[in-house]
Amino acid sequence: AGLDDFIAGLPKAELHVHIEGTLEPELMFELARRNRAPIPFASVADVRNAYSFTNLQDFLDIYYQGAQVLQVEEDFRDLALAYFARAVQDNVRHTEIFFDPQTHTDRGVPFRVVIEGLLAAGKEAKTRWGLSSKLILCFLRHLDEAAAFAVLSSAEPWLDRIEAVGLDSSEVGHPPSKFERVFARAADMGLRRVAHAGEEGPPEYVEEALDLLRVDRIDHGNRALESETLVARLASTAMTLTVCPLSNLKLCVVKDLAKHPIPRMLRSGLCATINSDDPAYFGGYINDNYRAVAPLLGREGLATAARNSFVGSFLDADATAVQLAG
Ligand code: ES4
Ligand code: ZN
């Protein structure tokens, strides 16, 4: 249809994608075979059948299990390169990927193995397809502050190749305030900051991310809409929200796509973007996510979301201008 072609033709930046969430079942089996790692599934179809979730925790349990097949540098490179290739097909020009070091270091995979694999893929994607990419190191919020400080220390040799820190995993019960001191240290180290907030957690968590973590973007932010004063604040500060429609549907954050809040966000003057989150688990890459809300947004809203993705990215002003010029 016309709208699908319009979406395919839009240059985009992706600002919310967990690289471990791009692990397709086919690659999971391939890596399990290569590494002689056991997986609790008999077939690719078996894996896809297990991907039915009622909330965030349901999903996270399966997601952390899948990530265990990732063991050596080549695995992380193959994972990221497959995602970059797929993103290029969707006319993604720039992507800022989250990675969860603790998911790997806690199983004995060194930080160096994870990051060197991801960096190698980033270089290859740049030369092969002209795709630019940045890394966002995420802390697992269900783990403690000391563990987050330890990850930050292990990242020091790569500081010049890490753009930002983020905060992900189980939101409710793990408010941003738990990581205030870690984020202050990250800021001192020259890193930008983002945090998942308001996906399942209340609007107060979004306020804490702004006030205590001093974030440059809010990941998700759906529940910010429950507070009129918070919406006004997010709009007046032009805070970017990285919204993930198919994720919201699969994790039951929204009941159905027709009720997705993104049209309300844009009408309220919020800088919403459209992203895939964990595309291998939620049934769609970035263009699928644009298509999911296309009937609600029309060409104008879709183009606004794509424009917001470059403005809200961590590209410098010159690179952003080049991207916006097409
Ligand atoms: C995540 Cl959708 C989502 N929310 C929080 N943490 C995550 N890690 C990977 N996907
Ligand atoms: Zn996410």
Image (cartoon, grey):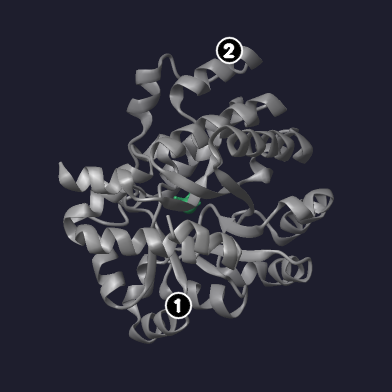
SS class of the residue under badge 2? Answer: helix
Picture coordinates of residue 106 (x, y %)? 71, 39
Residue at point 64%, 30% (across, down): 77
Q: Which residue is mark 1?
A: 238
Between 243 and 291, the one lying in front of the other is 291
In the picture, the quarter occupied by the C terminus is: bottom left
Between 229 and 125, the one lying in front of the other is 125
Above or below residue 255? Residue 78 is above
CA neighbours of label 1 inside 10 A, class few (<14), some (14 to 19), many (20+): some
Q: Nearer the viewer, mark 2 or mark 1?
A: 1
- Cα separation, mark 2 vs mark 1, equals 47 Å
Picture coordinates of residue 185 (x, y %)? 76, 68
In the picture, the quarter occupied by the N terminus is: top left
Compare marks 2 and 1 and give the one earlier in the sequence.
2
Q: Which mark is residue 186?
A: none
CA neighbours of label 2 inside 10 A, class few (<14), some (14 to 19), many (20+): few
Picture coordinates of residue 292 (x, y %)? 24, 48
Q: Disc 1, ligand 2: is the CB inside 8 Å?
A: no
Visible residue check, residue 316? yes
SS class of the residue under badge 1? Answer: loop
Picture coordinates of residue 41 (x, y %)? 45, 19
Residue at point 52%, 36% (across, down): 84
Q: Which residue is mark 2?
A: 33
Figure quadrant of residue 228: bottom left
Visible residue check, residue 256? no
Above or below residue 234? Residue 216 is above
Three-letter residue code for mark 2: Arg
Three-letter residue code for mark 1: Ala
Residue at point 77%, 54% (across, down): 160
Between 209 and 323, the one lying in front of the other is 323
Between 31 and 159, the one lying in front of the other is 159
